[in-house]
Image (cartoon, grey):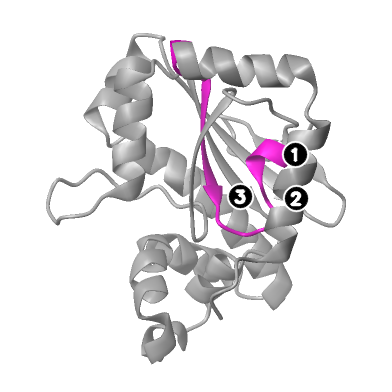
């Protein structure tokens, strides 16, 4: 299977043929002047939860890093590879990002993996299980607080709480904490309901989500 996917070829051709002149001009401007996005989004890799589409964003509007279950890990300097941390560092310290949005969504497979005790035993989820284990304490709290809830109720609760846990992890980064204290950076949590295409935002005080 070496052939480039035809739908990507066709899609790019439509992009070139139908993109309005003002958008093409904006691409030229971004190429010449560089990017200056105001919002950094930590989103899920899920194909149904694309931040650009959800927010109808234009080129240059969003600086996006996506991973399984839209997780922000706590601040650590050990180890060799830190994809999310490097995006935060570059976006906040070098692009002057003013807002960070952790964007979760309904029906998240990564969150299901956190909830499933069999995940860590599966050879085909070696990297996934290690990654999503960041949310193990959050999962344990959901199970403790909601012993009589249905599995779907527990899953949604974990989807929401994981967003708030990532917001907590963001504050473990010294440069994030400093910028927030200076009033130069704001942190936000969002939850996208795929079926209804509705957006819910986390209240910074109560941690509850309300519909936009």
Find disc 2 in the rendering and name its residue. Answer: 11
Helix, strand or loop under label 1: helix
User: Is 85 colored magenta in this rendering?
Assistant: no
Q: Earlier in the sequence, mark 3 or mark 1?
A: 1
User: Is 48 colored magenta in this rendering?
Assistant: yes
Residue 15 image label: 1
Q: Residues within 10 Å of mark 3 (few under 14, many from 20)?
A: many
Residue at horizontal 32%, vertical 29%? 90
Q: Residues within 10 Å of mark 2 (few under 14, many from 20)?
A: few
Q: Are marks 1 and 2 in contact (CB under 8 Å)?
A: yes
In the displayed structure, does residue 82 sit left or right of residue 35?
A: left
Is any atom of residue 149 visible in this view?
Answer: no
In the displayed structure, does residue 142 sit left or right of residue 174?
A: right
Magenta-highlighted residues = 33-53
Instruction: Calculate the distance from the C-alpha at mark 1 to the C-alpha at mark 2.
Output: 6 Å
Q: Earlier in the sequence, mark 3 or mark 2?
A: 2
Helix, strand or loop under label 2: helix
Residue 135 image offset from top left, x and y in percent: 42, 61
Find disc 3 in the rendering and name its residue. Answer: 104
């Amino acid at each position: 299977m070496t052939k480039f996917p035809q739908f990507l070829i066709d899609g790019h051709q439509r992009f070139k043929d139908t993109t309005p002149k003002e958008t093409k001009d904006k691409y030229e401007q971004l190429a010449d002047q560089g990017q200056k996005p105001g919002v950094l989004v930590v989103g899920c890799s899920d194909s149904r939860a694309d931040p650009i589409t959800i927010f109808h964003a234009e080129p240059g509007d969003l600086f996006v890093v996506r991973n399984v279950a839209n997780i922000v890990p706590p601040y650590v300097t050990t180890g060799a590879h830190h994809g999310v941390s490097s995006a935060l560092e570059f976006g906040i310290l070098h692009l002057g990002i003013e807002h960070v949005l952790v964007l979760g969504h309904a029906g998240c497979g990564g969150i299901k993996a956190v909830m499933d005790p069999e995940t860590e035993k599966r050879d085909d989820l070696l990297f996934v299980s290690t990654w999503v284990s960041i949310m193990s304490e959050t999962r344990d709290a959901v199970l403790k607080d909601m012993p009589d809830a249905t599995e779907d109720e527990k899953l949604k609760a974990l989807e929401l709480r994981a967003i708030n846990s990532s917001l907590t992890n963001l504050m473990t980064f010294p440069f994030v904490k400093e910028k927030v204290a200076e009033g130069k950076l704001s942190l936000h949590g969002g939850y996208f309901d795929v079926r209804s295409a509705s957006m819910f935002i986390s209240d910074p005080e109560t941690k509850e989500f309300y519909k936009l």
